[in-house]
Amino acid sequence: MKVGDVLPGRTVEVRPEPMKVTAALLRDPNMIHLDPAVTDELGLGPRVVNQGPLNLGYVHTLLEEFGRVVSSRFRFHGNVLAGDRVVPGARVTAVDGDLVDCEVWLDVVGGARAVSGTARIRAR
Amino acid sequence: MISEEELAGTVGHSMPGGTARVEYYADWLLRDALGAPPGEPGLAHPTFAFVAAQGGVGLSLEEVFARFGASSADGPMLGEWAVDFAEPLRLDVDYAVTCVVESARRKTGARTGVFDLVTVRIELTGPDGRVHVTVRPTYVFPRRATGRPA
């Protein structure tokens, strides 16, 4: 890998079912991840909201294809909803031996950037 | 709304802490939820650091929010999240978890009004006594005036 390389991510279709498993793993009682009636009532529309850890998890999954994650920092910009299609991405910003620094992101197809950040991986 | 002084006074405070252990099936479930392939043998998906850290704080999320004079009804959000792996997170290893408030500051946005940013540092210490994983979530607590819609 060299500076400027883009690590292309695969498009993920966001579905409600994984949010249910994730709510259980996180012991997260927030019903906006589970019940579309609740999101509707809150003015978010009739689609459940993906958990933040899943959003950054798509980016980690991309990075894992190229190496072992050493560190990562993420900023959350907006919600990802059931039915959205998202694409993680990374661009190499520095290389030092087998350590590779990247800027990373998760974009909603046809929408806004949901997550941005930086990561360091130890390349394989 | 807690005062700015009270907010600043939370810095350095510890949560009860506890333990964390990533079991194979739980890692499998997270990978399935993410559409991720199997990882290196014996290692958890890096995002499991989120689950392990949060689960080891020793408080529910609602109790964490209450430490900062907030509740889920106030619409707290996760603004940022960071992880540093001194060692990869391993399956079926018992980690001791500690959590301390690292920073807490009040800000005012033109559009958002007053809000507080609170960062906690959660450390997962392995059986060798070294910190293997450090996680830093930053929570955003909107501080809306009473009576305004959430």
Image: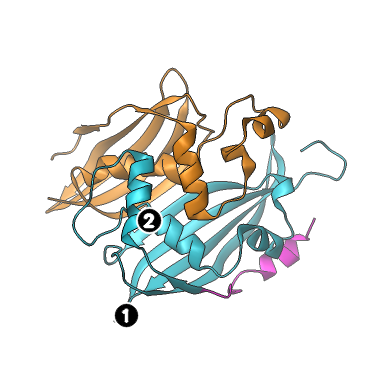
SS of the residue under disc 1: loop
Relative vertical location of residue B40 with respect to residue B36 in this rendering, above or below: below
Q: Identify residue for label 1.
A: B127
Left or right for B40, reference B8: left
Tell me which residue sits at (74%, 60%) in the image: B69
For residue A84: magenta? no
Give the label on residue B6, or none: none
Q: Where is residue B123 in the image (x, y as percent from the top left)?
A: 43, 70
Q: Which chain comes out orange in the rendered image?
A: A
Magenta residues? B1-17
Q: Identify residue for label 2.
A: B26
Q: Which amino acid does label 1 sit on?
A: Pro
- In this view of the protein, which residue sits in the foreground, B52 or A78? B52
How many circles with numbers are drawn on the protein?
Answer: 2
Relative vertical location of residue A113 with respect to residue A22 in this rendering, above or below: above
SS of the residue under disc 2: helix
Q: Which of marks 1 and 2 is in front?
A: 2
Tell me which residue sits at (32%, 26%) in the image: A11
Using the numbered discs, state the Cα–Cα distance from disc 1 to disc 2 in whole angstroms. Answer: 21 Å
Q: Which chain comes out cyan in the rendered image?
A: B
Q: What residue type is labelled 2?
A: Ala
Q: Furthest residue to the right?
A: B147
For residue B2: magenta? yes
